[in-house]
Amino acid sequence: SSALRFLFGAAMLVYLEWRLAVVSLVILPGMVLAVRFFSRRMRVLSHQGMEQQAQVSRRMQESLSATSLIKAYSSEKRTVSQIMSELEEALQISLEGVSVGSLANLTIGILPEISRAIVLIAGAYWIILGEWTLGSLLAFQSYLGYVYGPAHYLANAGLQVQGALAALERVSALFDIVPEETGTGFPVQRLHGEIEFRDVSFSYDSQEPVLENVSCRVQSGENVAIVGPSGVGKTTLISLLLRFYQPTIGEIWFDGRPACEYELSSLRQRIGYVSQSTLLLS
């Protein structure tokens, strides 16, 4: 019905005055460009907002679950400062999203009004010259609603759906995760202990690399300590050894054989692992 309303309105505009109809219809591509421009920005902001809200929830859960540890080290002020920083960033993203949405609605709403003003000025001038009638001008203004009404509705719908698309991208990322392959590969009876990283790179988000071009070899019986500040990839390195994640680039070898050729469960059974987080399973 909206499409028929739009086509009927456009036809009547051309019938009443084709010159003003051309001016009025030229506004529509401008609305399309405005929607495309603001939609991309709103989708990015919606995605960033959801990621930041997840970060805030993670920080809150982490702090509440480690209350005794935080008190033991007198880290209350530092923890509160971190939580407030995360909340401020989430608020900043939210305010930016509201600003962009308001500007988008203002732009989409003002374009039809510019067209109506042009029609009113030109129509009034032609009426004074006797080239047009007041009834035709009023009818033309009325049929503008037939054209701009559906266009404005579609533009608003296109903007509002960006939040849903951002959420869908986050859900789709879960379905893109490849499940672990168990029960296939070479079963591990014993490991001699030789480990080799061959140009291993890894990133959690496919944008910022955590490890980049790591190459090293650990001989059997050799003791190696990996030290560094928080966030440099020490835990990630061990997670790659246990094949919790797959390297983005490169390979990890055990005893002269790529790790991907071993049966996963038997490989993990031959690796001693002490987690950095304390957890007792009943």
Image (cartoon, rainbow, N blue to C red):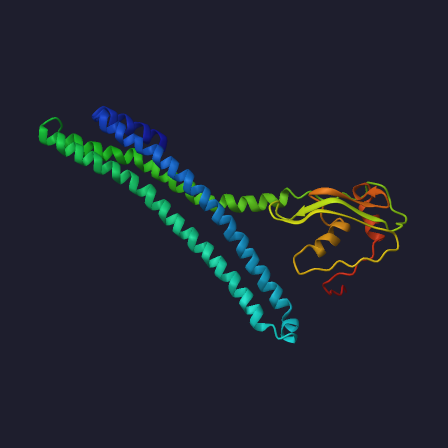
State whether residue 1 appears in this view. Answer: no
Q: Nearer the viewer, residue 232 or 149?
A: 232
Q: Which x, y percent locates residue 211? A: 68, 49
The quadrant in which the N terminus is found is top left
Q: Is residue 243 left or right of residue 43?
A: right
Q: Is residue 281 left or right of residue 266?
A: left
Give the residue drawn at x 36%, y 39%. Answer: 153
Q: Which x, y percent locates residue 99? A: 39, 51
Q: Nearer the viewer, residue 127 or 200?
A: 200
Give the residue drawn at x 57%, y 46%. Answer: 170
Residue 1 vertical position relative to residue 247 in the rendered view, above or below: above
Q: Which x, y percent locates residue 214? A: 73, 48
Residue 223 vertical position relative to residue 206 in the rendered view, above or below: below
Q: Is residue 263 left or right of residue 139?
A: right
The quadrant in which the C terminus is found is bottom right
State whether residue 56 appears in this view. Answer: yes
Give the residue drawn at x 71%, y 48%. Answer: 245
Q: Is residue 255 left or right of residue 100?
A: right
Q: Which x, y percent locates residue 233? A: 69, 54
Give the residue drawn at x 37%, y 45%. Answer: 104
Which image quarter: residue 92? bottom left
Residue 119 vertical position relative to residue 58 in the rendered view, above or below: above
